[in-house]
Image: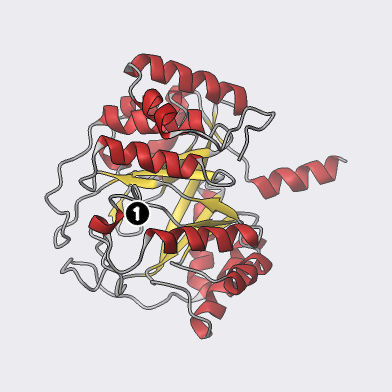
Amino acid sequence: MSSHTNGVRNDWTIEEVRELYKLPFLELVYQAASVHRKYHNPSEVQVCTLLSIKTGGCPEDCGYCSQSVHHKSAVEIQPLLQPEDVLKAARKAKEAGATRFCMGAAWREVRDGKAFDRVLEMIRGVNNLGLEVCCTLGMVSEDQARKLKEAGLHAYNHNVDTSPEYYGKVVTTRTYQDRLETLKNVRSAGITVCCGGILGLGESEEDRISMLHTLATLEKHPESVPINTLVPIEGTPMQDNQPVSVWEFIRVIAVSRILMPESMVRLAAGRMELSAEAQALAFLAGANSIFAGEKLLTTPNPEFERDMELFSVLGLKGKVPDNAEKSMRAANA
């Protein structure tokens, strides 16, 4: 692993990450904002929408998740949606200004068969609408990743959640290595990677540093790094967890921006709890993507209108999807 000429490094040491994390808050935000301006248009934010295409009944025991069969949450199990319903939701998201459409299924892993074929059909349909398509379907094999790519999948989301050291306290039904294996399969199929973490799982500051170090030293940085804060859900083992302070959340965003300068850093779950001012600070610290719409899988999320008001106050605009930019460039060539 070596430093690249464009300033992107994959050889960060844990000490360097810790040093950044411990910087005085305003100094850290200033450094992150400077990096952000060098690599991105600071007035552009990508708007993404996430749809749960198959809800509940997951055999995994992730302590934060309401969709696990191991927990007694109020989430009702719903079978895999039909492609036409998914396309209807995708059109609605596009009309409201989303440029990336993500589909999540509560599966431990993808199994070949009718359900997987139906997901491939959904991907083809959403791709034809000119939206970037992202999926999160659990673990995938190399062969399945290749099929997803052929169907037009743009990105695959598979978070590391937390540090390798703390992971076993969050999930026991799979290992950290399983996570990294799926990321490798996705990457080798030529699909971009969406991979971040969740704050508020009971982890220490050292765990956050270790998680950021894991992401920043992957062979290639994830193109998209979603930073989630736990939304405690009744019936899950983490229902009484203490909320993460806004300062810690923005600190993680700023460090992510410095470590992974080219990646999109995404405000994901937990955004409902952030004030407009906190979100403004997050954008300044390098966040340049949000999940919008009414729900994020099974947790509430600010509605489009409110986001658009905030964009207008801050002078931000939505980012055009990558594939639209490509076709525009091709048309002008």
Local secondary structure at mark 1: strand
In the rendered image, the vertical position of residue 307 relative to residue 7, given as above or below: below
Measured as percent of width and height from the top left, residue 174 is found at 35, 67
Residue most extreme to the left: 240
| Tag 1 residue | 295
Q: Residue at x 71, y 43 (%)?
A: 325
Counting other residues with Cα less than 10 Å from the Cα at mark 1, is it few (<14), some (14-19), or many (20 or more)? some
Expressed as whole percent of the image width and height from the top left, the position of residue 125 reads 61, 67
Q: Tell me the quarter of the picture where residue 75 sits.
A: bottom left
What percent of the width, then of the height, locates residue 20?
40, 24
Quarter of the image where the N terminus is located: top right
* Above or below 308: residue 53: below
Q: Position of residue 43 (x, y in %)?
A: 55, 26
> Viewed as shown, does residue 192 lie left or right of 255?
right
Quarter containing the C terminus: top right
In the displayed structure image, the side of residue 153 where residue 211 appears, left or right: left
Amino acid type, mark 1: Lys
Q: Residue furthest bottom?
A: 113
- The front one of 317 and 75 is 75
Is 215 located above or below residue 102 in the figure?
above
Q: Residue at x 61, y 54 (%)?
A: 131
Total marks placed = 1
Splitting the image into 4 quarters, where does residue 10 fall? top right
Q: Nearer the viewer, residue 44 or 223?
A: 223
